[in-house]
Image: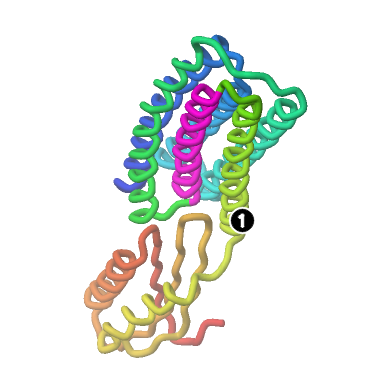
């Protein structure tokens, strides 16, 4: 039997599919512009978009794998796939930062004026993708807020840096062409590349910090624990005793185990109805949670 997670997972997959095709077209345009122009920033743009396309492809494949589950195989560890994909995105962005930095340093040491028809191709491309990446960043930010996920968080940061990159490349090319009569304008190209590289580095550090942290199983944040206690308090008249709560986060998934004692005079059908109600209420309040309620008469450590 194939396991499919809810609409949030399918929405993320659809969003990533759109990002893949947008990124593929971007790579074709940046490749053409780079080959037809003598510009270090266009070389950096070509390398950056190519590596980003690889990262998007792997992220898309990862979320497809998560959505479809493990079939007849065990699902243990499947939720970690998003975290691993996020780390790979971070590594790819780090590699992009190093390449762009090296190219910028070379352009500063050996300056040269940018030229070629590829500049106009790139300007047109940057204008188009400034709008595309801006809208995709806003869309992913909304998805990340409604369904928190390390993968969607990394994609949101990735497309924010791409939006910033488009703006800086457009500004760089415009200034370099407009101020070509000044010798110092040769340094505008590598300077803009360094700004892009630093923005990528900043996003990379954020991805590493969040994804590495999420790879470790850990207890829930205090505000989420309060949500659980509030729901249990709201149903306190439906059970006799609360003997313990265990909770942990594994990647984007939240697991909660609650141990309750019920009146022995109650029928099992009544107890099951209470259990289903409590579980449903908590899972609605905690997105991405899986709640298990066990019957017990003893305190749980």
Marker count (numbered): 1
In the image, residue 125 lies at what x, y percent?
A: 42, 22
Residue shown at the point (29%, 73%) measured from the top left: 278
Q: Judging from the image, what secondary structure is the residue with disc 1 in? A: helix
Residue reaching furthest right? 109
Question: Is residue 1 visible from the viewing direction of this image?
Answer: no
Tell me the magenta residue range.
150-179
Seen from the viewer's position, the closer of residues 287 and 38 is 38
Residue shown at the point (40%, 38%) measured from the top left: 68
In the image, residue 21 lies at what x, y percent?
A: 40, 24
Residue shown at the point (52%, 55%) measured from the top left: 251
Q: Quadrant of residue 275?
A: bottom left
Seen from the viewer's position, the closer of residues 161 and 193 is 193
Residue shown at the point (50%, 19%) measured from the top left: 30
Q: Tell me if mark 1 has few (under 14), some (14-19) or many (20+) residues whose alpha carbon lies within 10 angstroms of its own.
A: few
Vertical position of residue 252 compared to residue 13: above or below: below
Vertical position of residue 10 compared to residue 246: above or below: above
Q: Is residue 96 left or right of residue 227?
A: right
């Amino acid at each position: 039997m194939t396991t499919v997670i809810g609409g949030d997972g399918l929405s993320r997959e659809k969003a990533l599919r759109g990002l893949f095709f947008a990124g593929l077209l971007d790579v074709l345009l940046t490749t053409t512009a780079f080959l037809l122009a003598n510009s270090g920033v266009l070389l950096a743009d070509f390398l950056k978009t190519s590596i980003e396309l690889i990262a998007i492809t792997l992220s898309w494949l990862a979320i497809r794998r998560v959505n479809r589950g493990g079939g007849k195989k065990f699902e243990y560890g499947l939720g970690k796939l998003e975290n691993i994909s996020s780390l790979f995105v971070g590594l790819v962005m780090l590699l992009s930062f190093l390449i762009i930095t090296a190219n910028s340093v070379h352009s500063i040491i050996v300056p040269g004026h940018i030229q070629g028809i590829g500049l106009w191709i790139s300007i047109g491309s940057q204008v188009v993708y400034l709008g595309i990446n801006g809208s995709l960043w806003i869309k992913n930010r909304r998805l990340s807020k409604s369904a928190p996920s390390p993968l969607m968080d990394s994609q949101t940061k990735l497309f924010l840096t791409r939006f910033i990159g488009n703006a800086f490349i457009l500004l760089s090319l415009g200034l370099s062409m407009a101020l070509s009569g000044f010798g110092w304008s040769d340094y505008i190209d590598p300077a803009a590349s360094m700004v892009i590289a630093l923005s990528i580095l900043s996003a990379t550090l954020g991805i590493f910090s969040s994804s590495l942290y999420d790879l470790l199983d850990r207890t829930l944040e205090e505000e989420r624990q309060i949500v659980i206690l509030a729901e249990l308090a709201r149903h306190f008249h439906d059970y006799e005793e609360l003997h313990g709560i265990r909770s942990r986060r594994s990647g984007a998934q939240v697991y909660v185990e609650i141990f309750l004692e019920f009146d022995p005079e109650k029928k099992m059908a009544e107890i099951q109805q209470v259990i289903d109600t409590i579980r449903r209420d908590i899972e609605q309040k905690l997105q991405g949670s899986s709640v298990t309620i066990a019957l017990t008469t003893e305190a749980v450590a």
